[in-house]
Amino acid sequence: MLKIIIRELKKHIPFAIFGASTGIVIMVILYYFPIRFSYNIFYTLHPLHVLLSAYTTAAMYKHNTAHWHKNKIWIMILVGYFGSIGIATLSDSLIPYLGEVLLDLPNRGIHLGFIERWWLVNPLAFAGIIIAYFKQTTKIPHAGHVLLSTWASLFHIIMALGGSIHWSLFIVIFLFLFFSVWIPCCVSDIAFPLVFVKREN
């Protein structure tokens, strides 16, 4: 398992760098927009991130489970839900908030989608699991998941910005975007579901 995690983390470094770079470009263009605009974008991207994450995580579990039986569906539901809600909250909200605190941004705040927009985020997690039950495809949803996570993290940070920012902040924010996506997304989509697959499989 450790070898799998290390291998996948190495493979995802270029893609995480690409995602964080697109985030910086978007921030240069949109950072001065009203907070409400960033809030609405965040709550568009974050629920979509949860949907794709739940689908990919649940699909990875079912695809790698030998001798599939319907009694394993409850494990699939738990893996898909906590693997998406838990990790998406970490990457989209908690790590960006940590960055906002360390940078002492004026409008910092933590936004927990599964609580603030429980009626939207939680059903989408279950929708992703249901789709994964009938069809398992992981590569394209995982790629989309990584980009959505990067941009959701970005708009969480943009909400905290106030007025103009110094160019040095772009470097620090780039690093937070990179780490908020690189490790959590690999853990969520790959390592977490495989923990629940029997070793002999």
Image (spheres, rainbow, N blue to C red):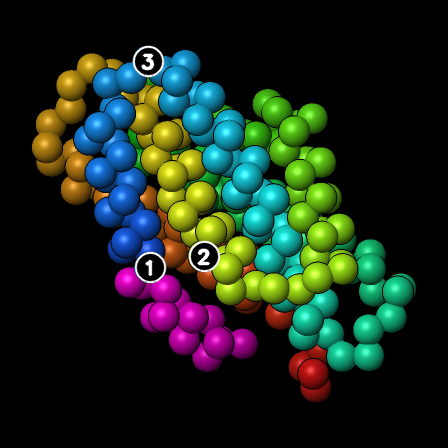
| Residue at image coords 17%, 34% | 169
Residue hosting label 2 = 143
Q: Inspect this view and state whether residue 105 appears.
A: no
Residue hosting label 3 = 34
**Image spot of residue 168 (x, y percent):** 11, 36
**First in sequence: mark 3 vs mark 2:** 3
| Residue at image coords 45%, 39% | 92
User: Identity of the amino acid at label 1?
Assistant: Phe
Magenta stretch in the rendered image: 1-14
Q: Which of 106 and 128 lies nearest the eye of the viewer?
A: 128
Classify residue 38 as left or right of residue 71.
left
Q: Are marks 1 and 2 in contact (CB under 8 Å)?
A: yes
- In the picture, the quarter occupied by the N terminus is bottom right
From mark 3 to mark 2, how far is it between C-alphas? 29 Å
**Image spot of residue 29 (x, y percent):** 22, 28
**Image spot of residue 15 (x, y percent):** 33, 59
**Image spot of residue 49 (x, y percent):** 52, 43
